[in-house]
Image (cartoon, rainbow, N blue to C red):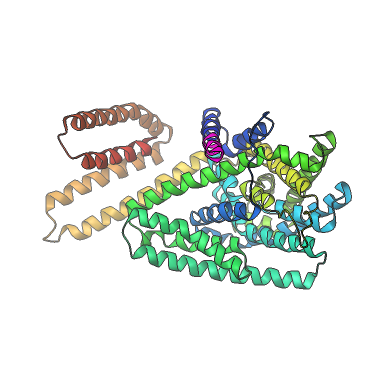
Amino acid sequence: MIDAVLVIALLTAITVLAGLASRIGAPYPVVLVLGGLAMGFVPGAPVPELHPDLVLLVFLPPLVYSAAFLSSTVELRAAARPILTLAVGLVLLTVGAVALVAHLVIGLPWAVAFVLGAVLGPTDPVSASAVIRRIGAPERLVTILEGEALANDGTGITTYGIAVAAVGTGSFSLPGALGTFAFAVALGTAIGLATGWLGTRARQLVDDARVETALSLLTPFVAYISAEQLGASGVLAAVAAGLYAGSQAVESSSPGTRLQVSAFWDLLVFLLDAVLFLLIGLQLPRVLEGIGGGLSGVLIGQALVVAATAIAIRLAWMFAVPAVAGALRRGSRTTSIRATAAARLILGWSGMRGGVSLAIALAIPLTVAGGAAFPDRSLVIFLAYATVVITLVGPGLTVGPLLRRLGLEQGRERQRQEARARARVVHAALARIEELAGDEEVPEDVADRLRNMYDARLNRLKAWLHRGALAERDGANARPLRKAALAAQREELAELRAARAFPADLLRDIERDIDLEESRLR
């Protein structure tokens, strides 16, 4: 009963905090992590028992799979060089730098210090997407940040596994670690691609949204567990499965099913990420107790040093590696130095840690070989949590103003790109209608109605592109009228439902179409 009450309390807190984030216009991960921090200090707040292995299994596979599924393999390939450089080189440098500071400044044993470094090495794909996309960052930067966050999970978590094993055995071999790393990456990727292929083929055999949703939910767990059982990287397996499944989504599912699956995953990822933020906040009293006292100036100072190290290493990397600057010039030698430096500054400041780091931190084993307690486990979790708070809240609240100050915000440019893309699609529809209009099986009046519909759509897009502010004003003036028309349709539906004039499921289908139209309007 206590567990059920806790679940309801968490869902209530998530709803309130997410609503607050929407109300004040802040990224929801920022509000959730601050809310979780506040909940941890509420007297009498429950402290749930969390099994480390269960945390890793439940949270990581769906989080990284969903982010991979939504990524574009074409864009990732185009930005492969900076992504791989950041996902491997920067992660390993961050792990080493954080470990060095944790050992020399805080006094953690070397192996434990490397565990902390591995926890904080990878950035978080969900947090990056939630913060960066909403503020209109250039698409190139978004692709690099999201691709890095996907790929560096495998690097960070594989390094984490090696470091945890070193804590347990008390020994470390660099050649052995490199061999383990290469094996885990290669086999994990292969298992993920195979699982993604099998999941896609299974979804092609059915035409039921509920079954396909269940298959999509099983895919990351099958990939992760299979890889882990064989000693490979389960996270990279889930990422590879998500990339493959996402690239085949159009061929494997119907439009209606894709809409339902997408809505399911949006909610699932949001809830998993939110629950992680709140759970680790509730763990704070136990974590502080494990350290040996309450929150102190020394602990806060240590957390600031670790977070500053992670941020400083990332910023230094962005300005020290010529390959990144070259990739950001988009193949043009005329790009100004100022613009390139501005883009690198945004990339450096956007290294947010989030749910992935929290899940890894909570998954640190309670004991090592022989049954002894994992040394300094509570301190590592606290330092990791504090770094997540700092790297999320700081960039989350400031990267938007920084983008505007540097002239990189592209809200209007993205709207123009959308209009041009939609116009290309409409032109293709009109060309196909003309191609088929002469067919005897296609009535001329039907072809004319379709032409008129697409022509009207094309004219609206052209007006937006050519008239700019005037078209935007016209759209704003038309919005109230469209809202009124939608409201009238809903009122009529309510009357039809009350009069039982038509079957209820038929009216629900019509209402769904109205919902889609209104969502596009909003």
Dominant SS in magenta? helix
**Where does residue 485 sit, x and y in percent of width and height?**
27, 29
Residue nearest the viewer, comparing 213 with 309: 213
- Please provide percent x and percent y for residue 225: 56, 63
Q: Quadrant of residue 248?
A: bottom left
For image coordinates 17% across by 48% down, the residue present is: 448
Determine the residue positioned at 57% across, 37% down.
Answer: 27
Q: Residue 6 colored magenta?
A: yes
Occupied quadrant, residue 173: bottom right
Q: Using the rendered image of the protein, determine whether residue 37 is visible from the camera's viewpoint.
A: yes
Q: Residue furthest front?
A: 1
- From the viewer's perspective, is residue 283 above or below residue 254? above
Residue 333 seen in render: no
In this rendering, the answer to whether 197 lies above or below 378 is below
Instruction: Point out the image quarter for the C terminus.
Output: top left
Camera-side residue of 477 and 376: 376
The image position of residue 106, as x and y in percent, is 86, 47
User: How far across and how far down the image is residue 83, in percent?
Assistant: 63, 59
Per the rendered image, the range of residues in magenta is: 1-11
Position of 337 relative to 482 (above/below): below
Q: Nearer the viewer, residue 362 or 213?
A: 362
Q: Residue at x 62, y 65 (%)?
A: 233
